Amino acid sequence: MAFDWTSIAASGSGLSRREALALTAVGTGALLVGCSQTQTASKGTVIVVGAGLAGLGAASALKEQGYEPIVLEARERIGGRVRTIDHFGTKLDLGAAWIHDSKTNPLTGVAQKAGLQTVATDYDLVELRTGDGASVSSDSVDQAATAKDQILDEVDAAADSSPDATLQSVIGPLINDHDLSDEQAAALNWLLGVEIPLDVGAGPNEVSVEGFSEGSNLGGGPDLMIRGGAFQLVEAIAAGTKVSLSTAVTAITQSADGASVRTSTGETITADGCIITLPLGVLKAGGVDFGRALDQRTKSAISRISVGLLDKVFANYQQRWWPSETAQLGVTGAPIARTMSFFPLNAVTDKPLGVGFLGGSWAQRLEAAGEQALVDAVVGRLSTGFGPNAETAQTLTTAWQSDPFSLGSYSYLGTEATLEERTAIGQLNGNVILAGEHTSINRPSTMDGAWLSGQMAARRLAQALN
């Protein structure tokens, strides 16, 4: 079914390898943001597999280069891991929700041009309780935050000397070096949990030092949420692009003359080239036969980069009970890998609800155990720290690991992968190229990283086809 979204309207530089790769990505991203929107006469066709932000970004860039995109999407909707639904009388973002580093993030401009209303959020504003309901003092939180920043600075410094070491092996001794009270140490563990499993989607024993330190901010600025949901960004980017929905791709081949895909209905579609924007989890699952369409270096990179998980539990209450309207809530006492945070959404939704976050292999186990296990990990944990008012909630959970079209949330580098794998996974394979957040050196696991990677892939492929 086709749907037209028009109607919806360095050698010798002195830089480390990590810095040089990131600098290259920054330069490319800036070039993409500033390029002309002028469209030229069609030069041919290119198949785009996937209609998430990477695929939609690729489609728009292809049109700018004079190529007609043929966009195929396995789901019954566009957006991929950006999904906004109506629930609890408001809009909820089940997947990606934030425009990070909004000062120079290109999606900030997209939101402004589309007339979307954004709300600034502050993850540094936190309120913590212990497991027996005692308040953690603001002084303890401040001391823990200072220690956290120092530890993460030292982790960044270790990324060049010990890139493949586990994060746990580095932060463990660093934590012990700080002379903290029991309350401060518990607060530090919670803050590190927000930075690691709830950001990377993997525990400290799973992610490498280099993997934790990869990427770059875009000049700062508050992280923004969008009133009415992040899917409005998708709609704005998709305007004018035709997408064939419910069209899964099962095989991709290429020859000197072009590329072909076979769909789940048995149809074969041929074009001049192909851009594959399937999520890394789907690529790793092996449901698509690439044959010789991808070389061994690219296939090896797919196998070596890991997929993390971040699940959400939305909790809707009769009235707001949390002390601060905007502060992130947490309960100390759990290991870093089992950190839960609760973020109020009343400022965005005008409803007395919030969202709990669970990440890494712990989230995988909870998701596999079922919805109630996820709810207990958030609502049950909240109630131990903040009292019985936290218990009486209507809830909604996500299950991104179980979603057959995502099989996880976003990519990260474990101890077997390096930044070179990100470069390899996004390299040109004749007239086939991959795109997505997993190919981004500078902005992995972000909406803007996915979107810009699609544009970059489209321009690289167009240049090769010309």
Image (cartoon, helix red, strand yellow):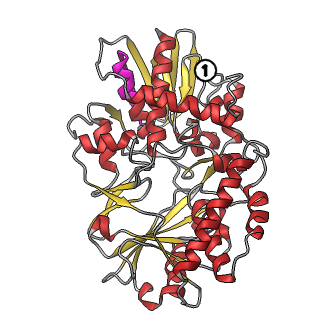
At 37% from the left edge and 27% from the top edge, which residue is drawn? Answer: 34
At 41% from the left edge and 39% from the top edge, which residue is drawn? Answer: 53
At 60% from the left edge and 39% from the top edge, which residue is drawn? Answer: 283
Looking at the image, residue 352 sits to the left or right of residue 463; the answer is left
Residue on which disc 1 sits: 429
Q: Position of residue 268 (x, y in %)?
A: 47, 24
47 or 34, nearer to the observer: 34
Looking at the rendered image, the quarter that the N terminus falls into is top left
Looking at the image, residue 352 sits to the left or right of residue 431; the answer is left
Q: Is residue 124 above or below residue 59?
A: below
Residue 266 in view in this figure: no
Q: Position of residue 319 (x, y in %)?
A: 31, 83
Q: Is residue 207 above or below residue 355?
A: above
Q: Is residue 166 above or below residue 438?
A: below
Residue 460 in view in this figure: yes
Location of residue 93 (image quadrant): bottom left
Q: Is residue 460 above or below residue 329?
A: above
Is 319 inside the magenta-drawn segment? Answer: no
Dot 1, how many residues are within 10 Å of its Cα: few (below 14), some (14-19), or many (20+)?
some
Looking at the image, residue 227 sits to the left or right of residue 52; the answer is left
Q: What's drawn in magenta, residue-wise? A: 59-74
Q: Amino acid at mark 1?
A: Asn
At 61% from the left edge and 53% from the top edge, which residue is drawn? Answer: 308
17 or 353, nearer to the observer: 17
Is 64 inside the magenta-drawn segment? Answer: yes
Q: How many numbered dots are placed on residues in this image? A: 1
